[in-house]
Amino acid sequence: MNDLDREALCEIIERVVAREGLELVHWEMAGPRNNFVLRIYIDKPGGVDHGDCERVSNQVGTLFDIEELIDAHYTLEVSSPGIERGLYKPADYERFAGSRIRLRSSEPVEGQRNFRGKLLGIENDLVQIEADGLGRVEIPYEKIAKANIEFVF
């Protein structure tokens, strides 16, 4: 898919999710170009239910078909972000301050790339965590490869 296609897909996904009064957490495409999975993660206060996922899936799938945006076989999945939800945008690092997280950076920060600890927030594009065994660490937002809430059982 080229960038134009991704932009058109994103616009439809964002429009449908907003119309349903939901939050678009993240969307991604995985797998080979001719048989990929398009995953959409949605949320709302109190969590999403099966009906929310079904409505978004039906509307997005129908609009993709009408607009003829995808000319390959694909599987559309719509779900909640789950208990160990990913952190994808700067606002997530403020919203979930105080939570335990797992974070992997694209480059070493203070000699390592993998961190676990309490998320303190984000300031000036620096994600701040109280990292287990290291204390306070600041990681540039643009160097975060992946971050998730870490649910403690």
Image (cartoon, rainbow, N blue to C red):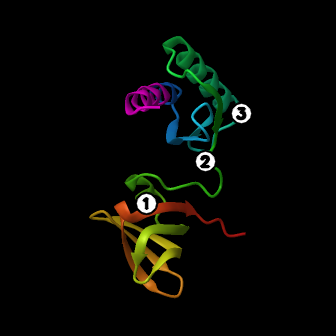
Query: Which amino acid, by three-letter code, is at mark 2?
Result: Pro
Q: What label sits on residue 81 in the rendered view? A: 2
Residue 112 appears left or right of 122: right
**Disc 1 packing (10 Å; few <14; some 14–19; many ≥20):** many
Labelled pair 2, 3 in contact (Cβ < 8 Å)? no
Q: CA distance from mark 2 to mark 1?
A: 15 Å
Say which residue appears at 67% left-offset and 70% top-offset. Answer: 152
Q: Is residue 84 visible?
A: yes
Question: Split into 4 quadrants, where in the image is the C terminus?
Answer: bottom right
Residue indicated by mark 1: 93
* Res 111 quadrant in image: bottom left
Which residue is pictured at 50% across the width and 68% down the height? 104
Looking at the image, is mark 2 or mark 1 earlier in the sequence? 2
Say what secondary structure mark 3 lies in.
Answer: helix
Kindly indicate the quadrant of the structure image that contains residue 41.
top right
Closer to the chain start, of discs 2 and 3, is 3
Start and end of the magenta stretch?
1-14
Q: Amino acid at mark 1?
A: Tyr
Q: Is residue 103 left or right of residue 48?
A: left
Magenta region includes residue 6: yes
